[in-house]
Amino acid sequence: MEQTGIPQEKILEELNEKLKKDLTYESGKILGSMCTTPHEIAKKVMMMYPEKNLGDPGLFKGTQEIEIETIKMLGSLLNNPKSWGYMVSGGTEANIVAMRIARNIGRAKGKGGTPQVIVPVSAHASFDKAADLLDLRLIRIGLDQEYRVKISEVKKAITEKTIAIVGIAGTTSLGTIDPIEELSDIALENNLYLHVDAAFGGMVIPFLERLGHKLPKFDFRNKGVNSITIDPHKMGLAPIPAGGILLKDRKYILKNCFEIPYLAGGTYAHPIIIGTRPGATILATWATLKHLGIEGYTKIVKNCMEITQQLEKGIEQIQNIELATKPVINIVGITSKNLDICQIDEELRKQNWALGKFENILRIVVMPHVKKQHIQQFLKDLEQITKKIQ
Ligand SMILES: Cc1ncc(COP(=O)(O)O)c(C=O)c1O
């Protein structure tokens, strides 16, 4: 640290200079991120209340009430306004919290040995983190031709040590939606906890349904669903960090809280991982949800899907590459039988295109910052690269 402080303008200049290395969403080059520029109202609100700390909610009762209202809005989007939950740091924390509650419920049922959780192979790495932290064993289930978990394999994988099943609504690599309705039936038949990871899809699928897309019912309409991860800092245009964990029943939470007795605002009990927690991003999420409303989000999702279709058609016209599967939401996977996907990715990166890379798949997430002209340019560059390396 400096001995003598530096004037503010000089610091801002230096910061500006150093951050020139960052890619920006406005450039349109970021095609592989699930985050985007937050909405204007989100930025404004976030800057207004940086000191709000929901780690000590007794001091910030108004902020806490807004968190509850935010959870209610997300709950009604997921067809259960009575669900209870918390705003957390993101999908990773939400999934870990859900797995901890599932493990504790399993323990309370007297299940012995290392608890087993059935997850699709498409599950996000946060489940590996949860397994490591909570001493769980993941039983990984393969996917069908449309990259959804194989239901028959899920049934076969259940043992006396199984405590939970996980389904994904909007997988990280391809955006596919597992047959949650069938998973719900299996969970109910076997008295198992069912968690749905809709970290990305939760802020997309409800609006696609309103646009008439026929998609699997992924939310609390299914009686077997116990909890859902939904992240406003992805398609919700909220600032980072703004994740959400919603539980069907408040009793699961009450039995699984850590009590913090020393706080200035009074004792606080919660089941989440972090302590000091930004209120500002939650206030900004609340403001964005209220400002955009169902209509605003539906319009944004419609636009993203139109650009997704533009990309889909463009990929189909380029030789030697193909779609991994037909996109169901605004995520597109590119694969190839003849060309090396890693080489394509390397060449794209030389031109500053930043895509997600999965085993044999390049992923594009058509976020609101991705415009038609960006996709046109991308398709041109991609076609040239495939010609160059074949
Ligand atoms: C399906 C899914 N779940 C969970 C996560 C983790 O979210 P976060 O990075 O906000 O912790 C992601 C992130 O991409 C995801 O795609």
Image (cartoon, grey):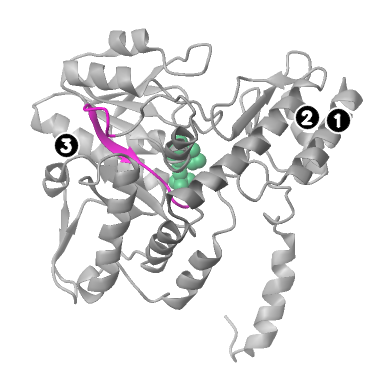
Q: Magenta residues?
A: 220-233
* Residue type, mark 3 in image: Asn
* Residue type, mark 2 in image: Ile
Residue 204 within the magenta-colored segment of the rendering: no
Figure quadrant of residue 210: top left
The residue under label 2 is 344
* x and y, in percent, of residue 38 in the image: 55, 59
In terms of secondary structure, where does tag 1 sit? helix
Classify 10 Å Cα crowding around label 1: few (below 14), some (14-19), many (20 and above): some
Identify the mark nearer the N-term, 2 or 3: 3
Q: Is residue 273 visible?
A: no
Query: Predominant secondary structure in magenta?
Result: loop
| Pointers 3 and 1 in contact (C-beta within 8 Å) | no
Residue visible at 38% across and 61% down?
286
Res. 325 mark: none
The residue under label 3 is 104
Q: Distance from label 3 to label 1 (Cα)?
A: 51 Å
In terms of secondary structure, where does tag 2 sit? helix
The residue under label 1 is 385
* x and y, in percent, of residue 300 in the image: 56, 47
Q: Distance from label 1 to label 2 (Cα)?
A: 7 Å
| Pointers 1 and 2 in contact (C-beta within 8 Å) | yes
Count up the numbered dots: 3
Residue 223 within the magenta-colored segment of the rendering: yes
In terms of secondary structure, where does tag 3 sit? helix
* Residue type, mark 1 in image: Ile
Q: Distance from label 2 to label 3 (Cα)?
A: 45 Å
Q: Is residue 32 above or below residue 361?
A: below
* x and y, in percent, of residue 140 in the image: 39, 19
